[in-house]
Amino acid sequence: MKSKIVFTIIGGGSGQSNILRGLKKFDIELNSIVTMADDGGSSGKLRKEMNILPPGDLRNCILALSNIEPDMEKLFQYRFTKGSLKGQNFGNLFLAAMSDIHGDLKKAIAHTTKILAVRGNVYPVTYDYITLSALLKNGNKVVGESKIANEVKKQNSKIDKIYIQPENVKASEDAIDAIRRSDVIIAGPGSLYTSIFPVLIIDGIKKEIEKSNAIKIFITNIMSESGETDDFSPKDFLCELKKYFGTTLFDYFLINNSYIPDNMISKYMKNNQKEIVFSKEDEIVFSKNNVNFIKDDIFCVKNNLIVHDNEKVSLIIKEIFEKVKKKELSYI
């Protein structure tokens, strides 16, 4: 019998780790299921040179759930700037070393979480080596997660389909077990095609989410992502889920509804990123699909970047869970 409520968040990148920092303050069992599709930067180099699964997103989630001094976190996020280690991240190298010492990544994560006093569980979505590829609307294929957004912009052709190779990749038992035991399943925020979908399309993950009686919440991004979600509105996240999986998968969509200062918007527009704005058309699409949407002020500025306010987001998620259980909110 479960002793605690179980929350599981899926995805990767800074969006997932940011929300984990808010959720870990609750007295819950917290699980993070992380994409293994990264093949760029420090993770990509280690993947190629040491034949290990990409550690970057795992590192960020482990640190988000850890209870360590600020200086120790700075160390694990430190990136070398010169010499043969230029571009490498210390935390990634640490996980690579632990994998060598203990024989595999699963044991490396277990030992690292003990060392860093992690409050929760971090699981790779798969322990198999995968390559993420995209079919663009112009018919061209792009192989490699790190190349997709750049090729979309270069070829001026949006993503038509995301897929992984090899096709028979299986989800990790840890990830499947976490989903089965979950009371709440959360996806996002993060890169839709290169962080969230690479978890959802792994064999078994979608099926387990569909079967689950958990409350399922999708957190939409605040700003569009150039090369991935250009010109998206909240309904487009829902429509893409339905296109890929035949279902929206999630019962609630959490959408930012706060004013963002013009100077911040202008900064992002230089990178062809726009604010994701909810409109009457979005409301119609959500209603037609019988999906609940919650709009709220969940934006903040951190390190001069637009991010989700993880404390506000966490409180809203907790409130959704409590109200559904008390039957004060509709549950589909």
Image (cartoon, rainbow, N blue to C red):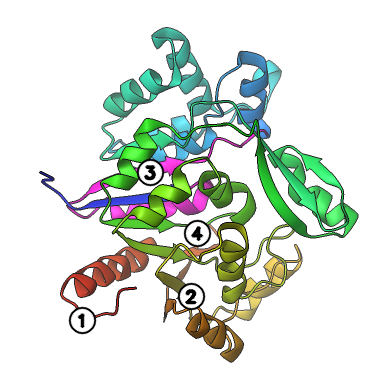
Q: Which mark, residue 189?
A: 4
Q: In this view, does 83 lie above or below 1?
A: above
Q: Mark 3 points at which residue?
A: 32
Q: Which of marks 3 and 2 is in front?
A: 3
Amino acid type shown at disc 1: Glu
Q: Foreground: 3 or 48? A: 3
Label 1, on which residue? 328
Find the distance from the CA under tag 1 to the CA under tag 3: 28 Å
Badge 1 or badge 2: first in the primary sequence:
2
Distance from disc 3 to disc 4, alpha carbons, whole Å, reads 13 Å
Residue visible at 50% across and 32% down in the picture: 170
Q: What element carries label 2?
A: strand
> In the rendered view, does 3 fall on the left or right side of 94?
left
Q: What residue type is labelled 3?
A: Ser
Residue at screen point 44% across, 21% down:
105
What percent of the width, then of the height, locates residue 69? 31, 36
> Is 297 placed left or right of 240 in the picture?
left
**Residue linked to disc 2:** 256
Residue 260 seen from this side: yes
**Segment tinted magenta in the rendering:** 11-39
In front: label 1 or label 2 = 1
Q: Is tag 1's residue or tag 3's residue first in the polypeptide sequence? A: 3
Q: Which comes sooner in the sequence, label 3 or label 2?
A: 3
For the question of whether residue 17 can be seen, the reply is: no
In the image, taking residue 212 as reference, residue 100 lies left or right, namely right
